[in-house]
Image: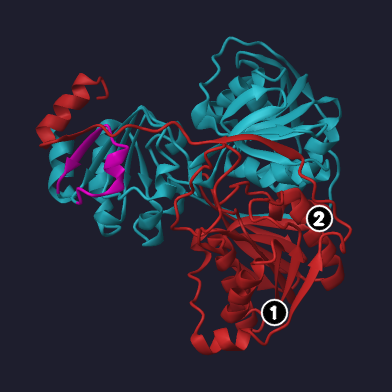
Chain colours: A red, B cyan
Amino acid sequence: MKIIVPIKRVIDYNVKAKVKTDGSGVDLANVKMSMNPFDEIAVEEAIRLKEAGVATEVVAVSIGVKQAQETLRTALAMGADRAILVVAADDVHTDIEPLAVAKILKAICDEEQPQIVMAGKQAIDNDMNATGQMLAALLGWSQATFASEVKVEGDNAIVTREVDGGLQTISVKLPSIITADLRLNEPRYASLPNIMKAKKKTLDEKTAADLGVDVTPRLSVVSTAEPAAREAGEIVGSVDELVAKLKQAGAV
Amino acid sequence: MSVLLLAEVTNGELALDATAKAVTAAKALGDVTVLCAGASAAAAGESAAKIDGVAKVLVAEDVGLSHRLAEPAAELIVSLAGGYSHIVAPATTDAKNIMPRVAALLDVMVISDVTGVVDVDTYQRPVYAGNAIQTVKSGDATKVITFRTSTFDKAGDGGSAAVENVAVPATEGLSSWVEDKVAKSDRPELTSAGVVVSGGRGVGSEEDFKIIKALADKLGAAVGASRAAVDSGFAPNDWQVGQTGKVVAPDLYIAVGISGAIQHLAGMKDSKIIVAINKDEEAPIFQVADFGLVADLFDAVPDLTEKL
C-alpha cells in the first residue's frame, strides 16, 4: 500500500508573524520556515504504518515555492521514500489556496494511486483546515479528519477523531483521506545519517501547469491588519486584592 | 441573497448557542434558511424555527445522516445548494469536517472561521493564529463559510419560521460510525460558557487539575486547558483552548499556570476580562491580562476558590 503525505512549508511554529506595514500580508522575508507541525505528525504516522508492515511506500508531496525542497528533504530524512515538488509560486508570499492544492493533489493521486493520503488537519499560516476534505470530495473518497488514532484493518481504516464533545471513532473505506490532529503521535527527529541518506533519495519536480491545474486564487486579499491589541492591565498583590478587583469589575 | 445555514444538531438535539450565533452572522447576508439534518432532526427543526431571523427551516431525516458523517452530509447540502448564494455553518468540528467538502463539490473556495462580515462577498478572518486579520473578497458564485461563533452575539428567540421536510439523496456508504466517547460533564459547554477557568503546563499533572476544576465549579465555569497541558496528558483534547483547539470569548477567563504562547492567546484573547495566575512574572500571558497575580498557583487557586 502506498501513502501520499502532502506537506506545507510554513512560518516556523515559534516565530511570531508580523504584518507588513503596507497591509499587503504577513512578512515572510528572512523568516525561519519549517514543515507545518500537523504535516510532521502526518509524515510520522505514515512512516509508522510502513514500519508496521501496513504500507510499502511513503511519498511526500509539497506544493508551493522551489524552497519547499528543503521541507521535502526533512520528510525524506524522517523516513519518507521519495518526494514530489510541485512548483506553483515564485514568491514565498503567494499562498496557494486549499482548493488549488486539492486539485494538484488529485492529479498526483490519479498518477500514484495511493490507498491513503495522510495530511495535516490545518496549516498554521492560513488556518483554513480544508485541503484534506476538499481532496476527498474531488476524488470521491471517504474522509477521516482530526485523527488521534489510526488502525488499518483490511480494506478499511478505523480512525478515532477529536471532535467538540470528545472522541468519535469511524470506519472509512480505503482509499481514504486522513487528516492528523495533535495527539496522533510525537514526530521523530531525523538523525544525521538519515539526513545524509535523504540527500540521495528521489525528489521529482513538476509544475502546476504540468498537471493542468489553474492556481488562480478564488479569494482576493483586500487587506491584512494587526489584530486590535489588548492592553496589559495591572498586577495585583494578593488573592484578596484580586477578589476585590473582580467584584468591582462585576465579573464575579 | 439567500443563505442556507447548516444547524449544529447532535443526537437529534439542536445546539442552540452555536446555531443562534451563526444566524446572527448569516442575517447580514440575506434571508436565512436553516437546515437540520440527522437520523432524527424534527425536534431540532422545531427549535431552530423559533430563532429570531430564521425565515424557513428544512428538516432532513435519514439514518445515513446520523453521527454527522461528512460524505452524506455534504451530498445532502449540495443537493439543496441550487437556490442559495451563501451556504454557512457555525465553525464547529462537525462543520469544519463537512463544509470544505461541500465547497470542493461546488468548485468554490471555503472561507473558514469568519469573524466579520464586511459585505455579501467580503469577510474578515484571522490567520497565523490570530496574529493577523485578513479581509478577503470571494469571486465565487456560491460562498461557503464557517463562522467563528465567539465573535457573534446569539440571535434571540421569538421566531416562527415554517418547517419543511426535504428529501435525502441516496449515498454510497464510504464511512460508518463505530462509537462515540463523549465526556459526561455537568459543567457548561466550553465555547458558550460565561466563565472559563483554564490550566496549563504549570498545573503539573492530571491529578492536580482538580484545583482548576474546583475553582471552575465554584464559579459555575467551564474548564479549559492549554495545548501544553493537553500534550502532557493533564487534560483531554476537547478542553484545548487555542489556535488548534477551541476559540472562546467568555466574560471572564482565568488562566492558571499558562505561559501565554501565541497559539493559546489565539483562542482566548477576545475574552472580556482576563485573569492570569502564574509564578513567572515574565510570562507573556500577563501582557494580555486585565488582572495578573504573580503567585504559586497551588497556594493562590485554592485560596481564590475559598474567597470567591
- Magenta-colored stretch includes residue B292: yes
Q: Is A223 placed left or right of B191 in the picture?
A: right
Q: CA distance from mark 2 to mark 1?
A: 24 Å
Q: Eyeballing the image, is B20 above or below B125?
A: above
- Magenta-colored stretch includes residue B137: no
Residue at screen point 50% across, 60% down: A12
Q: Which quadrant, please, contains the N terminus of chain B?
A: top right
- For the residue carrying disc 2, how many other residues have a C-alpha within 10 Å: few (<14), some (14-19), or many (20+)? many
Residue at screen point 80% across, 34% down: B140
Amino acid on which the number 1 mark rests in the picture: Ala
Q: Which residues are magenta?
A: B280-295
Mark 2 or mark 1, which has the lower sequence index?
A: 1
Residue A103's label in the rendered image is: 2
Residue at screen point 61% across, 55% down: A121
Label 2 element class: helix
Q: Chain of mark 2?
A: A
Q: Which quadrant, please, contains the C terminus of chain B?
A: top left
Q: Chain of mark 1?
A: A
Amino acid on which the number 2 mark rests in the picture: Lys
Residue at screen point 14% across, 46% down: B295
